[in-house]
Amino acid sequence: MKAWVLKGIEDIEQTQVETPLINKGEALVKIRACGICSSDLDRFYKGAYHYPLILGHEIAGEVIEVAEDLDKNLIGKKVVVFPLLPCNKCQNCYNKNYAQCENYNYFGSRRDGGFAEFLSVPLWNLKIFENRFDFLNASLCEPAAVAKHTLSKIEGKEICIIGSGVIGILIGIWAKLANLEVFFLIRNKAKAKFLEQLGFGVIFSTTKKFDSCIECVGSEESLQSCIEITKSRGKIILVGNPKAAINLPQKVYWNILREELQIQGIWNSEYPKDWDFVLKNLDKIPAQKLITHTFKFHECQRAFQALSSTSNFHIKGTFINE
């Protein structure tokens, strides 16, 4: 099969690799759409867990073959892939906290992922979605599940989101669906216009304080902003992956103590609960607006260039396999 193989920093090439074999309990999925996550860009530009590696974990596709122990009626079904493969042996797995598994595997980072024609996936990691949805819509399921998991940690009715990438926007979509009052604190005027078109409140600065503030950037500055605009005994939810060390001035740290602020981390999603919610509400996601860039399979290098450009407006880029 064809696959894009990452061989080192900024070293990726399309090549022929062996089509994966299916083991007991697994299905072979023809990948029809795979979202390009910012973590894929980080692995390309900054380094991966190991090499060689096939990136990609936001996967939607079609089952084309199943192991002998699985129901043959699965063949032809449209599916999305939960990319985390838990060990099912540690205490966190025993408690069904799979995202906190102590010895997990992961498509697209610790093992080969979705920037390929096919992927062998355990049945447990597959979720079937309705035929009325296309693969492009379904490829948003993974970030949408992370957003839904974030929603479950929000307290209060007035929230502010800092960070207008796809996960931040999806958090806003689920929050509005839950009848919360949602604002985005933002600088970029093009992003502000885009968010307003989606029906969100946009602020460029504020003295108002919020019940919960969601940090979706992973920067020191945005964390400080969250601390400043969260109400006493309010909640700060950290979603964005840090780009570097996060250091807080003593005065800002004191503010956390004096205001008794809660700080909640977010990692991945709760499976299968969050994924079931997303698939039931997939029609609430304006995929055609959020996926601003689509790329054919052979356009990997062009995709990375376009999505890493600061001068090029984008929300989400996705590979399409015909």
Image (tube, rainbow, N blue to C red):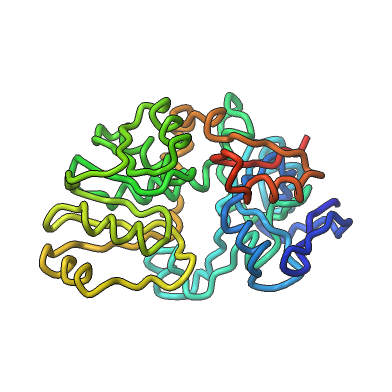
Left or right side of 137 for 170: left
Left or right side of 157 for 312: right
Q: What residue is at 55 percent from the left and 52 percent from the top?
A: 82
On screen, 47 above or below 230?
A: below
Q: Residue 170: where, in percent of width, then height?
A: 43, 40
Left or right side of 194 for 76: right
Q: Residue 178: where, in percent of width, then height?
A: 28, 35
Q: Check the picture and name the quadrant holding the C terminus.
A: top right
Q: What residue is at 48 percent from the left and 45 percent from the top?
A: 165
Q: Residue 31: where, in percent of width, then height?
A: 72, 44
Q: What residue is at 53 percent from the left and 34 percent from the top?
A: 290
Q: How many marks?
A: 0
Q: Residue furthest right?
A: 16
In the foreground, 193 or 145: 193
Q: Residue 131: where, in percent of width, then height?
A: 61, 27
Q: What residue is at 61 percent from the left and 53 percent from the top?
A: 57
In the foreground, 240 or 138: 240
